[in-house]
Amino acid sequence: MSKKEEELSLEERVERIRKKRQRIGNYDSLRNYLNGVFLVLAAIGLILYFSSEEHKFLALGIIGVGMVLKVVELFIRFVL
């Protein structure tokens, strides 16, 4: 392999890394949105859980939905 081919392969590797970083950066706004929704649902669920004896099951459901959204956000962060 000549030196020119080695340089091209290095340039290609760097370009692949750049494209991968750009692809990862595209999901930042979605991740931020999911985190915000998770925090809101968790706060609503906790307030409802501790303030009302009648709605504990509903509060746990709200917290559960928030946790599912958090798992989706973690999946986006580490897999995509």
Image (cartoon, helix red, strand yellow):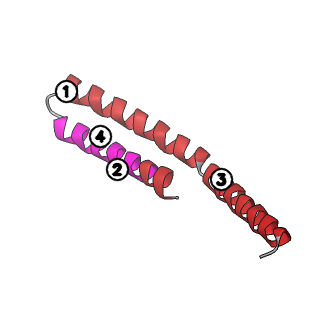
Question: Which secondary structure type mostly characterizes the magenta part of the structure?
Answer: helix
Q: Does 25 lie within the magenta span?
A: no
Q: Which mark is residue 21?
A: 3
| Residue with the most extreme front position | 2
Apparent side of residue 39 relative to residue 67 in the rendered image (left or right):
right
Q: Does 69 lie within the magenta span?
A: yes
Residue 15 position (above or below residue 74): below
Which span of residues is magenta-colored?
Answer: 56-73
Give the secondary structure at mark 2: helix
Q: Which mark is residue 63?
A: 4
Q: Where's residue 22, x and y in %?
A: 69, 54
Q: Where's residue 28, x and y in %?
A: 59, 46
Label 3, label 1: how far apart the Cα atoms are: 46 Å
| Residue with the most extreme right position | 4
Give the secondary structure at mark 4: helix
Identified by mark 4, the residue type is: Ile
Q: Determine which residue is flagged by label 2.
A: 68
Assess whether mark 1 and mark 3 are in contact (beta carbons under 8 angstroms): no
Residue at figure coordinates x 85%, y 69% from the top left = 4
Nearer-the-camera pick, 21 or 47: 21
Residue 66 position (above or below residue 1): above
Label 1 crowding class (10 Å Cα cut-off): few <14, some 14-19, many 20+?
Answer: few
| Residue with the most extreme top position | 51
Give the secondary structure at mark 3: helix
Q: Determine which residue is flagged by label 1.
A: 52
* Residue 29, quarter of the rendered image: top right
Label 2, label 3: how far apart the Cα atoms are: 26 Å
Apparent side of residue 1 relative to residue 47 in the rendered image (left or right):
right
Assess whether mark 2 and mark 4 are in contact (beta carbons under 8 angstroms): no
